[in-house]
């Protein structure tokens, strides 16, 4: 008992300086603790989004590539956290710098002040800051994975992801979130419609263009839809992503402030819901049948669209942003298919197209008079130019060293066997069971066929 009491007294003594600093920072010790706990919880919610991306991507692609999809998503989050710890965090938040490029040194280190309210005005500690931001960093490369799925060489993707998440994302991210030149002119991106989603979307566009479409996607100049293998899995993925967005946007308040956090979560959910409904009816009108994949992408479109201004638009503005995102994501998918840019999961349309829309929407719907459309447009253009150039350079170098695309034989056989020597499912057993009960699987659902017909004119 005496030992326990001595330990408690010692722990209290260690906490006293931090509690005093909490008072000096304008927050109570309880508020400091609550803020930090919420930020750690938000980091966990954003981490769950990586499972959402993995299941969504697996569900919208073919079963013969599932192990490859899951391996890539496992690698991205792992290498993303490591490279962000090695150099990314200090590239993105270099402190005082010229506004374009700065570096605070390799690795993670903090003095005693990093564990007190002085570090972030009572919001969180240095370690919580790193953890939350690291979850965002890996997301940008995960977006690329879906757009290049089913035909990119695994080592090529791994090499690209390492450089992209380790260098490109934190450097361009510092221009706004690190207090760089875009922050200086008033550009606003609350949680990353551009800094995370459009940055990943631009890279995804470059990758899809350099790889070319999958075999069988366009035959005789005509679009041939390639249905996903597991729509229940895709649906689970989208709802996991929606859950994760509670941390993505809610955590970006950077404290547990009840008013700001709750309002941000309401605008986020309203935009997601509006995006889903808008995409449902838009695709239904185009195809003549309700399309689940479009409805799911409508949810993500609304979430991406609201992310730039979730804390600064009105309730009506959030619904409008989500509705427009749901409509344009359908049009964007049709557009990219028409110009023969093959994106198996619609990542470019969701993250790039709707990321641009959400960023520009801040200049239209923000309740803050300091936010302007032209400033938002400058930010969109700046990130587009920088990311296109860097992604083209990295993909080009990787292509020169090892090539980007698997052989036609490997693509037809499936990347699970060619790259990993193992399938995610026992396809022969599954086929046997279906045949034994006289079941069959239609290769082209009615809705997908009608969408293809509308695209081909």
Image (spheres, rainbow, N blue to C red):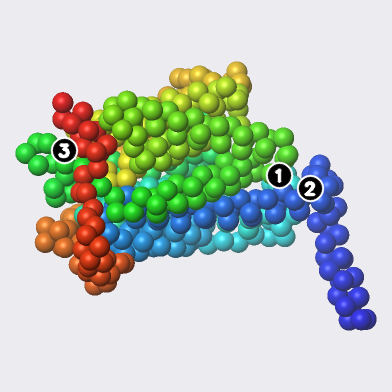
**Residue closest to the eye, 294 or 33:** 294
Which residue is disc 1 drawn over?
Answer: 256
Considering only order in the chain, which callout, 3 or 2, is on the residue closer to the N terminus?
2
Give the residue displayed 17% in from the left and 58% down from the top.
411
| Residue 264 x, y percent position in the rendering | 62, 35
Tell me, yes or no, whether the two marked residues, 2 and 3, touch with CB atoms within 8 Å. Answer: no
Mark 2–mark 1 distance (CA, rounded to whole Å): 8 Å
| Residue 210 x, y percent position in the rendering | 20, 45
Q: Secondary structure at mark 3?
A: strand
Residue lying furthest left? 220
Give the mark count.
Answer: 3
Q: Secondary structure at mark 2?
A: helix
Considering only order in the chain, which callout, 1 or 2, is on the residue closer to the N terminus?
2
Mark 2–mark 3 distance (CA, rounded to whole Å): 56 Å
| Circle 2 Cα neighbour tier, 10 Å, few/some/many (<14 / 14–19 / ≥20) | some
Tell me, yes or no, whether the two marked residues, 2 and 1, touch with CB atoms within 8 Å. Answer: yes
Depth check, mark 3 against mark 1: the one in front is 3
The C terminus lies in which quarter of the figure? top left
Mark 3–mark 1 distance (CA, rounded to whole Å): 49 Å
Which residue is disc 2 drawn over?
Answer: 31
Q: Is residue 35 visible?
A: yes
| Residue 70 x, y percent position in the rendering | 36, 61
Considering only order in the chain, which callout, 1 or 3, is on the residue closer to the N terminus?
3
Give the residue displayed 29% in from the left and 54% down from the top.
229
Residue 427 shown left or right of residue 251 in the figure: left
Give me the disc on residue 223.
3
């Amino acid at each position: 008992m005496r030992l326990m009491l001595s330990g408690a007294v010692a722990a209290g003594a260690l906490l006293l300086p931090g509690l005093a600093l909490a008072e000096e920072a304008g927050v109570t010790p309880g508020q400091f603790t609550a803020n930090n706990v919420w930020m750690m919880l938000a980091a966990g919610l954003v981490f769950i989004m990586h499972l959402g991306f993995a299941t969504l991507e697996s569900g919208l692609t073919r079963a013969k590539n599932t192990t490859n999809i899951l391996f890539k998503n496992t690698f991205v989050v792992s290498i993303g956290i490591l490279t962000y710890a090695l150099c990314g965090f200090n590239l993105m938040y270099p402190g005082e710098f010229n506004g374009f490029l700065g570096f605070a040194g390799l690795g993670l280190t903090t003095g005693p002040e990093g564990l007190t309210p002085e570090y972030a005005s009572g919001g969180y500690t240095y370690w919580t800051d790193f953890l939350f931001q690291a979850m965002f960093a890996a997301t940008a490369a995960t977006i690329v994975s879906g757009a290049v799925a089913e035909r990119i060489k695994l080592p090529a993707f791994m090499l690209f992801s390492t450089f992209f998440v380790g260098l490109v994302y934190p450097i361009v991210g510092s221009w706004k979130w690190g207090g760089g030149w875009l922050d200086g002119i008033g550009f606003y991106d609350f949680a990353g419609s551009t800094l995370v989603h459009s940055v990943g979307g631009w890279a995804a566009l470059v990758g899809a263009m350099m790889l070319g479409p999958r075999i069988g996607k366009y035959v005789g100049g005509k679009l041939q839809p390639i249905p996903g293998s597991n729509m229940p899995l895709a649906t689970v993925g989208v709802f996991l992503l929606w859950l994760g967005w509670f941390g993505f946007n809610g955590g970006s308040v950077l404290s547990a402030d009840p008013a700001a956090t709750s309002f941000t979560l309401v605008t986020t959910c309203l935009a997601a819901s509006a995006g889903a409904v808008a995409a449902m009816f838009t695709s239904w009108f185009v195809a003549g049948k309700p399309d689940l994949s479009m409805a799911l992408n409508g949810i993500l479109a609304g979430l991406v669209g609201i992310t730039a201004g979730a804390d600064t638009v009105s309730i009506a503005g959030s619904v409008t942003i989500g509705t427009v995102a749901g409509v344009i994501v359908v049009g964007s998918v049709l557009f990219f298919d028409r110009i023969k840019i093959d994106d198996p999961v619609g990542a470019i349309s969701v993250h790039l197209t709707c990321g641009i829309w959400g960023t520009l929407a801040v200049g239209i719907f923000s309740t803050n008079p300091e936010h302007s459309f032209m400033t938002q447009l400058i930010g969109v253009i700046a990130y587009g130019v920088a990311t296109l150039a860097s992604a083209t350079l990295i993909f080009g170098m990787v292509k020169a060293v090892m090539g980007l695309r698997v052989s036609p034989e490997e693509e037809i056989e499936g990347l699970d066997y060619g790259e990993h020597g193992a399938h995610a499912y026992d396809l022969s057993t599954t086929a046997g069971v279906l045949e034994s009960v006289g079941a069959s699987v239609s290769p082209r659902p009615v809705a997908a066929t009608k969408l293809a017909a509308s695209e081909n004119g």
